[in-house]
Image: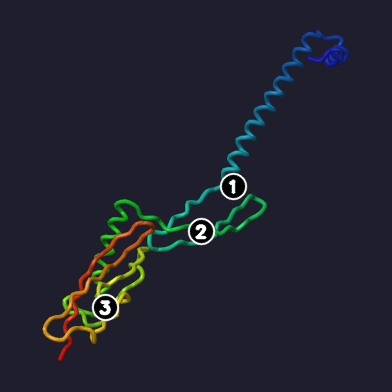
């Protein structure tokens, strides 16, 4: 305790025991300091809780593979200003077993799609369908045939180039499937019958 404070207490209270007055003053001072410290602690906790409410985090879902990327508008609010921020979210990336399964499912799908308006790969007389992607996925496709004069790399069938006689030609179609850096080749055989007489 400061000497000046002690002297002032003794001057203000000449009849009472000055030691008792000084002791009571010390107690009241300690109580006030404790009260201020407790209040500061409560305010700190309240401010921290309030800050957590203001910085609420919302979970953003990533689009499934094949749905492409999307842009979501996120609103940031600091209590005084609101700012709208565009956030680009890429689709989920397939890896491991999920990617192997996607390629297997793509092969089954392509077996049906590539056939186009033909009823069977044993009698291909009409143009084939060569999409650039497997529908509903991000698997990119390119095609290569071993006899492009009969079936070109775009699926066009040139019946005028098929042989005459009783025997047609079996054409190998290599479908190059690509997803990210992973590639796989799916092979389909298409029989082009001979020209009709």
In the rendered image, which residue does mark 1 sit on?
Answer: 54
Whichever of labels 1 and 3 marks the residue nearer the N terminus, that label is: 1
Q: Is residue 110 above or below residue 50?
A: below
Instruction: Estimate the spatial distance between the alpha carbons at disc 2 and disc 1, rounded to whole Å.
Output: 23 Å
Q: For the image shown, how many numbered marks are present on the structure? A: 3
Point out the residue furthest to the right here.
11
The residue positioned 32% from the left and 76% from the top of the image is 154
Label located before the other in sequence (2 or 1): 1
Judged by depth in the image, the label closer to the viewer, 2 or 1, is: 2
How was the colour assigned to the protein in this rendering?
rainbow
Q: Residue 33: where, in percent of width, then height?
A: 71, 23
Q: What is the quadrant of the C terminus in the image?
A: bottom left
| 86 relative to 179 in the view: left or right | right
Left or right of 195? Residue 145 is right
- The local secondary structure at tag 1 comes to helix
Quick one: 93 or 45, which is closer to the camera? 93
Label 2 to label 3: alpha-carbon separation: 41 Å
Q: Which residue is mark 2?
A: 88
Instruction: Determine the residue located farthest toward the bottom in the rendered image.
Output: 197
Residue that badge 3 annotates: 151
Q: Position of residue 148 (x, y in %)?
A: 28, 77
Q: Of callouts 2 and 3, which one flags the residue occurring earlier in the amino acid sequence?
A: 2
Q: Nearer the viewer, mark 1 or mark 3?
A: 3
Image point (57%, 43%), residue name = 52
Number of the label disc, if any, that sits on residue 78: none
> In the rendering, at what x and y percent does residue 92 appear?
40, 56
Is residue 44 shown above or below 107? above
Label 3 residue SS? loop
For this rendering, which residue is in front, 146 or 72?
146
Occupied quadrant, residue 32? top right
């Amino acid at each position: 305790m400061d000497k000046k404070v002690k002297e002032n207490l003794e001057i203000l209270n000449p009849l009472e025991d000055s030691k008792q007055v000084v002791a009571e003053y010390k107690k009241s001072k300690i109580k006030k300091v404790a009260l201020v410290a407790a209040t500061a602690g409560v305010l700190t906790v309240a401010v921290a809780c309030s800050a957590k409410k203001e910085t609420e985090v919302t979970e953003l879902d990533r689009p499934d593979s094949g749905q492409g990327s999307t842009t979501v508008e996120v609103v940031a609010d600091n209590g005084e200003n609101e700012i709208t921020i565009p956030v680009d979210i890429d689709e989920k990336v397939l890896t491991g077993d999920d990617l192997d399964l996607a390629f297997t499912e793509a092969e089954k799908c392509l077996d049906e799609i590539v056939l186009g308006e033909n009823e069977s790969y044993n009698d291909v007389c009409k143009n084939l369908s060569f999409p650039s992607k497997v529908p509903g996925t991000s698997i990119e496709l390119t095609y290569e045939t071993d006899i492009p004069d009969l079936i070109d790399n775009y699926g066009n069938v040139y019946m005028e180039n098929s042989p005459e006689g009783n025997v047609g030609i079996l054409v190998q179609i290599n479908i190059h499937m690509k997803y990210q850096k992973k590639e796989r080749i799916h092979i389909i055989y298409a029989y082009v019958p001979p020209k009709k007489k």
